[in-house]
Image (spheres, rainbow, N blue to C red):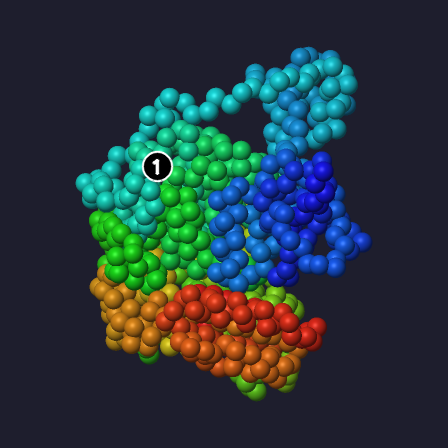
Amino acid sequence: MEPHVPRTARIALNRPIRRLFDYLVPDHIALHPGQRVTVPFGRQSATGLVVETDAKPPEGITLKPVRSAAEAWPALPPETFRLLSWASDYYQHPLGECLFTALPPALRRGRPAVENADPYWQACGDPALLPGNATRQRELLAWLNRQPGGAGSKQIVRAGFTQSQIRGLQEKELIREITPPTPDGVTEETRNRIPVLSPAQQEAANQLPSPDNGFATALLFGITGSGKTELYLHYLKTHLDDRHQALILVPEINLTPQTVARFQFYFGPRIAVWHSALKDSERLSTWLRIRNGEPVILIGTRSAVLLPFTDLKTIVVDEEHDSSYKQGEGFRYSGRDTAVYRAHLNNCPVILGSATPSMESYHNALSGKYRLVRLEERAGNAKPPTIKLLDIRSRPLEGGLSRPALQAIEKCLNAGQQALVYVNRRGFAPVMMCFDCGHMVECPRCDTRLTYHRRDRAMRCHHCDFQTAATERCPKCNSESFKPVGQGTERSEDVLATQFPDFPVVRVDRDSTQRKGSIQGILETVNSGRPCILVGTQMLAKGHDFPNVTLVVVVNADGGLFSVDFRAPEQLIQTLLQVSGRAGRGEKTGEVLVQTCHSDHPLLQSLAAGYYLPVADQLLAERETGQLPPYRAMAILRAESDIMSTSLKLLDDIKSKASGSGIESWGPLPALIARRADRHRAQLIMVSNNRVRLNRQLAALCQDLDRMRLPADVKWAIDVDPLKTG
């Protein structure tokens, strides 16, 4: 009789450590890669994910047994598991944390992969049978009587009633629990709807790759207002049948309501949503629909690309250039680039859409790696807006706005149209300065100044969230000459409200849209078509369709022209063209006024011509001359500690290992904001012509850094393909 060979499993935990843990597998448990398990970890239990089975453990170690399997099936199917393993290797991040990113919060905490029961209720009694003081129960019963098919408890609570009122009616036998009705699914009317394309849109649609031909990447260069969303809808209606899944990535949560409504019109209940503002129960419900293979069309932000699709046939990345697709901390992955690799694994097409493509995607299209599809006509009768540079040197400004800009806004409003004012700073003013002693209020925890928010009478740091009360006198010399300097959205809002008291001024920034549902209220105001002024930050530049906006004013276009970050000119031109694209999307002609002190700058001159690709060609030529991405691969090793010398020393010690054959290193140097939240930050930049070699060197660096006994206050991280180099 053969001796019993114990079975083992290698488990990943949701911890910031680059090692896996071996456990014994009891005979009664069958495990597969991607499966959730409960294991002992120290004195506690932890939820883990199986990475490998029957791996040979280190000798001389007594293994603890796996306690239980959460489900009999893998939470991460094979293709999703391969995607996350690749992302862990490419972005040099611990595998455990990468794998757990694909789980909703409830499953990360070890909850069962089942939805909470939602009892369904139907009225079966007369409200008149209730006593006079049971006002809310009577209202609930009357409300249920108006729901002939009944309603679930969650729906009842959303309508403003409580679980105790439901129980009260149940005890009085005035409502009864019934079996929930089966969803009707997509109606025949919805199934037959298909967008009508213009000749230009149809020509572009004919050039997009078909799912029948397997993996391909198409870069859809469609100018603002050209109808890229209609093209996505037409593509899915034409190529996606009722059995398969699709993924639509959008850069911002605030874009999802508008996008979801358009997709639901054509696809009904197949549409699902994924973003960080959803409740845990909503995320679990959507995750289960995807994992169970329902033919959902998921509209989601960055992390949606990591979900456990089982039958994915198409991926669309809208506004593919947007920096929101790159995670800024922790697992620093690019949602766009991960989507391309996911399409490769799924053998399906991926469409990258943008009016201002990133340099990386455009370079890939020029080199033939991607298919370039052009859509350079606006939908319907709309024409691209005219862009004018307004030189504000020596001009008096009111809240950052010149007199010609204010006159243009007045003319626009009097014509019954809407104006958009773009200000890329939140708050009232970026600086409070004493005009007697020159003192400016700085953040005590960061190397930056506090922003004045007049609405809240507060001074805030937009980097570490430090906050203190604003004062009317200089805190250094007690002078009354303590005044705000510069423009923020609040200041522009106040100036415009004073100048145009008969018209609503709507501010759109992170502060004004924090409350749930606030963005929907703002969009309803604008979409009503009544004359108004929109004032906002980059949130206004991203994909919104405002048909009655005919004028866009850019308060200051010079911010990115002289930055130390080589990507700043690209990001500046992208933002300005995107925000300019909000003008003239309806029947009326649009106009864009760009205020600048450098109207003769070549980039702004190219912007005024309204053509993005010549600007992109110019920027690519500069990148090639400097041998910067996309012509060379780049990664940044960042270190932070309580003292700058400690951060720099760590990078100095590791620099010799960071350099090698074909790899060049720059630095170490302090970061652009060297101190943030009382942490001193430094960085070492690595570039190489060979991405594989750079990746191999980064993996070796991670191993060396893991072996080093660093002080507790020292932290390090690697950022592959960074979007910010300052």
* Image x and y of residue 624, in percent: 29, 73
Relative depth, front residue between 619 and 600:
619
Tell me which corner region of the image, top left, top right, bottom left or bottom right, holds residue 706.
bottom right
277 lies above or below 665: above
Vertical placement of residue 494 versus 666, above or below: above
The image position of residue 696, as x and y in percent, is: 48, 67
- Regarding residue 641, the answer to whether it shows in the image is yes
Name the kind of residue labelled 1 in the image: Leu
Q: Looking at this view, is 598 or 662 the one in front?
A: 662
Q: Is residue 620 left or right of residue 154?
A: left
Relative image position of residue 11 (x, y in whole percent): 65, 51
- Check disc 1 and report the residue beneath it: 236
Q: Nearer the viewer, residue 589 or 109?
A: 109
x%, y% of residue 566?
38, 73
Name, please, the residue furthest toward the bottom.
437
Q: Is residue 35 left or right of residue 242?
A: right
Residue under the point 38% across and 65% down: 571
